[in-house]
Amino acid sequence: MWRLISMVVLALVLAGCKSPSSQTLSSSTDTDGTLHPAELQVTHSAKVICVSAQGANNSPAKCNVNNNQLAPAESVTTDEKVYMICAGTAPVHCTAEVQ
């Protein structure tokens, strides 16, 4: 019986240790400069990773997350709203993962 109770307690503890699921944000800037920002309110400290950013004619671009210019694979940590736009030669498309 104690073994069963121990296993249940362990399962509950491990379930509580799961990290929150990640979310993907996408943003773009049209050729005419019209921004399509992405926003996400976070309730905990979150790591935001620029996954991809590409401008016109495959030119390099960046994810601008809360005024931090991030190249793909770079990250920033925040505990406030995540606000992302793409920086580069329009049209620009970028994505980021919020963990």
Image: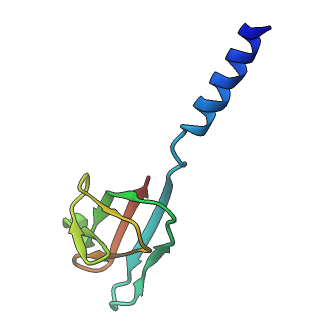
Count the marks. Answer: 0
Q: Position of residue 88 (x, y in %)?
A: 22, 76
Q: Position of residue 44 (x, y in %)?
A: 47, 60
- Above-or-below relation of 36 to 17: below
Q: In the shown orientation, is residue 22 left or right of residue 30?
A: right
Q: Nearer the viewer, residue 47 or 84?
A: 47
Please, which residue is most extreme toward the front here?
A: 2
Residue at 68% x, 24% y is 9
Residue at 33% x, 90% y is 33
Colour pattern of the rendering:
rainbow
Q: Position of residue 13 (x, y in %)?
A: 61, 31
* On-image quarter of the N terminus: top right
Residue at 45% x, 67% y is 26
Dividing the picture into quarters, in which one does residue 62 lie? bottom left
Q: Position of residue 58 (x, y in %)?
A: 24, 64
Q: Nearer the viewer, residue 75 or 45?
A: 45
Dividing the picture into quarters, in which one does residue 74 lie? bottom left
Q: In the shown orientation, is residue 59 left or right of residue 97?
A: left
Dividing the picture into quarters, in which one does residue 31 lie? bottom left
Residue at 44% x, 74% y is 81
Q: In the shown orientation, is residue 88 left or right of residue 84?
A: left
- Above-or-below relation of 25 to 23: below
Q: Nearer the viewer, residue 51 or 76?
A: 76
Q: Nearer the viewer, residue 6 or 46?
A: 6
